[in-house]
Image (spheres, helix red, strand yellow):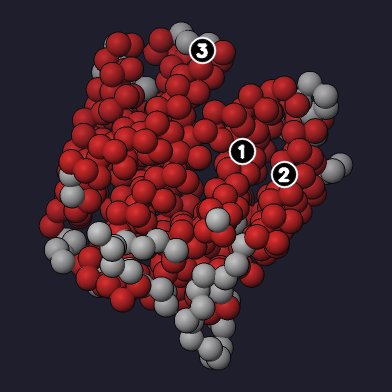
């Protein structure tokens, strides 16, 4: 029962984080009207959070390897709550940025949650299935968030952000009482380095994992390009309005949750080796991008389904295998670097998408496909086989 409580707290942590992102998407443009701010301010608020996350994630991950997962998770959840409260109470623009900075500078929830679940997993398949569960929660929260945001904003423009802060506070209380430490065999002593570029530098020297970091960057580049122009493309190419786009987002989230929460364990992990999935799904992912850029609505929707299936499985399998290869002593740092790499891609991808979209609406899909083909080449030819043994000491053999 204790293990179940641990998982519930971790799942709720991820849910609250993603719910906050979902809440902010439909509400923020209207919230900013009180500050007489436009599109530039909107994108800047997203960018400052991504930048802070890029800098903080590796440090928090390394810190969790040194002092434990629990204290860093508590710090991160507290920071999320404080960030939302500051954002909701803002009377000036600089306070809005302060709120996003507070949240971003301790935005280590997701990679440390992954490290926590990896610590308590008995074997590789259970670890991947656990990652699939939090991936499914990600999809569900992404469906519920915009709905909550729209409904709560009818009370007041700031109320959705107060609500997100209160949820994070409740999550913090639950974690204080029900979340034990899982990383108990960590090394003691030694100086803690808070320079964010130190773990990133170590990552670049890691022969076993750096090719996967590169593939993860290309993955993030493609997905962030799609996110940046998705609604704009639907409007320009097919004349689809905001309400229908919301339904499409909801459908994507539901399909993602079904794929990661149910099909991953019952189909994908039974029929295929993880080493196969993390390579060849990049080809299907790239094809999906090309189909979506053709300009036919039916082909677009078919490509979108392939996109969601390939993306959601790749996200889980690659994260799980990297977590396993890292080993307990450096797992937090490695997962933090993965989050940092993804943040870097999320800063770069939208900029590329915006420029090439101006030239032609289909070009972001072409660039996304090329990025995914680059990821395939890296995974196929640069990743050495047999790296699974990297974490043998931290995986408890399954008792049949």
**Foreground: disc 1 or disc 3:** 1
> Are the two marked residues, 1 and 3, in contact with CB atoms closer than 8 angstroms?
no
**Foreground: disc 1 or disc 2:** 2
Residue at the location (21% across, 43% down)?
270
Instruction: Determine whether the residue tagged by mark 2 lies in a helix, strand or loop.
Output: helix
Residue indicated by mark 2: 167
Q: Position of residue 93 (x, y in %)?
A: 78, 43
Q: Position of residue 361 (x, y in %)?
A: 37, 22
Q: Earlier in the sequence, mark 1 or mark 2?
A: 1
Looking at the image, is 105 positioned above or below residue 298? below
Residue indicated by mark 1: 19
Judge by depth and name the residue closer to the eye, 114 or 348: 114
Quote the CA–CA distance across marks 1 and 2. 9 Å
Judge by depth and name the residue closer to the eye, 217 or 318: 318
Q: Is residue 219 visible?
A: no
Q: Position of residue 392 (x, y in %)?
A: 27, 72
Identify the image quadrant of the N terminus: bottom right
Looking at the image, is 1 positioned above or below residue 163? below
Q: Earlier in the sequence, mark 1 or mark 3?
A: 1
Identify the image quadrant of the C terminus: bottom left
Q: Position of residue 83 (x, y in %)?
A: 73, 51
> Are the two marked residues, 1 and 2, in contact with CB atoms closer than 8 angstroms?
yes
Label 3 Cα neighbours within 10 Å, binned few <14 / some 14-19 / many ≥20: few
| 236 to the left or right of 163 | left
Q: Which mark is residue 244?
A: 3
| 62 to the left or right of 157 | left
Looking at the image, is 94 positioned above or below residue 145? below
Looking at the image, is 221 positioned above or below residue 304? below
């Amino acid at each position: 029962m204790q293990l179940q409580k641990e998982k519930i707290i971790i799942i709720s942590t991820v849910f609250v984080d993603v719910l906050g992102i979902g809440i902010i998407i439909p509400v923020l443009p209207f919230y900013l009207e009180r500050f007489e701010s436009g599109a530039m301010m909107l994108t800047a608020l997203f960018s400052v959070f991504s930048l802070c996350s890029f800098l903080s994630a590796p440090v928090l991950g390394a810190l969790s390897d040194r002092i434990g997962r629990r204290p860093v998770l508590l710090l991160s959840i507290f920071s999320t709550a404080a960030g939302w409260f500051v954002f909701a109470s803002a009377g000036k623009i600089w306070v809005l940025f302060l709120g996003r900075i507070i949240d971003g500078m301790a935005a280590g929830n997701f990679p440390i949650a992954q490290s926590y679940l990896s610590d308590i997993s008995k074997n590789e398949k259970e670890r991947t299935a656990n990652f699939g569960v939090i991936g499914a929660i990600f999809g569900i929260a992404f469906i519920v968030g915009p709905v909550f945001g729209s409904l709560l904003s009818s009370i007041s423009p700031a109320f959705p952000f107060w609500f997100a802060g209160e949820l994070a506070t409740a999550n913090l209380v639950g974690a204080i009482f029900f979340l034990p430490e899982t990383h108990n065999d960590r090394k003691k002593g030694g100086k803690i380095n808070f320079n964010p570029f130190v773990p990133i530098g170590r990552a670049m020297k890691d022969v076993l994992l750096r090719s996967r970091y590169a593939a993860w960057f290309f993955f993030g580049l493609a997905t962030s390009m799609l996110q940046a122009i998705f609604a704009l493309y639907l409007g320009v190419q097919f004349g689809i309005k905001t309400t229908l786009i919301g339904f499409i987002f909801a459908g994507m989230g539901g399909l993602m949750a079904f794929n990661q929460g149910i099909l991953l364990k019952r189909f994908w992990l039974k029929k295929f080796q993880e080493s196969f999935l993390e390579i060849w799904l990049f080809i299907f992912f790239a094809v999906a991008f090309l189909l979506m850029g053709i300009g036919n609505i039916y082909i677009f929707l078919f490509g979108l389904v392939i996109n969601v299936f390939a993306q959601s499985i790749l996200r889980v399998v690659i994260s799980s295998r990297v977590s396993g290869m890292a080993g307990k002593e450096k797992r937090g740092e490695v997962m933090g670097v993965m989050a940092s790499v993804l943040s870097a891609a999320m800063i770069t991808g939208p900029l590329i998408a915006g420029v090439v979209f101006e030239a032609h609406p289909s070009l972001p899909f072409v660039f996304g496909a090329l990025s995914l083909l680059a990821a395939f080449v890296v995974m196929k030819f640069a990743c050495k086989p047999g790296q699974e043994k990297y974490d043998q000491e931290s995986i408890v053999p399954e008792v049949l």
